[in-house]
Amino acid sequence: MLNVIEQPNSITVEITGRLDHRSVTEFKQLFGKSPPLWIVDMSGVSYVDSSALGVLLLLREQVSNDPKRVHLRGLQGQPKAVLTIAKFDRLFTMI
């Protein structure tokens, strides 16, 4: 489930539950927006799969591959382990 908070200079996407092939379609619908900063709050995410990695990479492309424009916040447990193994800490700002 996604909760989107739009502010003048940023969009915060709060995700709860699983970020998998069933939920990435809703996430992709936000890609028409182009704020200076995306904050993806993953503190409520319990599981990610390869489609989650793909949608995060698509988001990175959306912001011209600028890691300072996408912050991944609140990673823990399985999502943190998967993103760390995939070296996403080199591609995104993790807070």
Image (tube, helix red, strand yellow):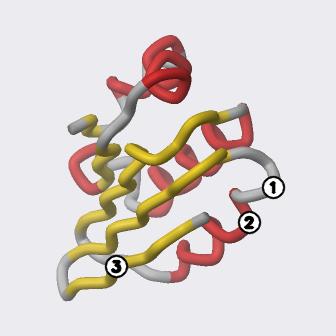
> Which of these two is toward me, 49 or 66?
49
5 horizontally vs 82: left or right: left
Residue that mark 2 sits on: 25
Are dots 2 and 3 in contact, CB under 8 Å? no
Say what amino acid the circle numbered 3 marks: Ile
The Cα atoms of the two marked residues, 3 and 1, are separated by: 21 Å
User: Circles 2 and 1: CB distance less than 8 Å?
Assistant: yes
Q: Earlier in the sequence, mark 3 or mark 1?
A: 3
Residue shown at the point (53%, 54%) measured from the top left: 16
Q: Is residue 75 above or below residue 19?
A: above
| CA–CA distance in space, label 2 to label 3 | 18 Å
Three-letter code for the amino acid on which mark 2 is drawn: Thr
Residue tagged by mark 3?
A: 5
SS class, disc 1: loop
**Separation of disc 2 and disc 1 at Cα?**
7 Å
Q: At label 1, which amino acid type do we have?
A: Arg
Q: Position of residue 51 (x, y in %)?
A: 73, 42
Are the two marked residues, 3 and 1, in contact with CB atoms closer than 8 angstroms? no
Identify the residue position indicated by label 1 in the image: 22
Q: Position of residue 14 (x, y in %)?
A: 42, 62
Secondary structure beneath label 2: helix
Q: How many marks?
A: 3
Residue 63, horizontal then vertical, whole percent: 39, 60
Query: Can you say which quadrant of the picture contains the N terminus?
Result: bottom right
The foreground one among 59 and 73 is: 73
Foreground pick, 22 / 51: 22
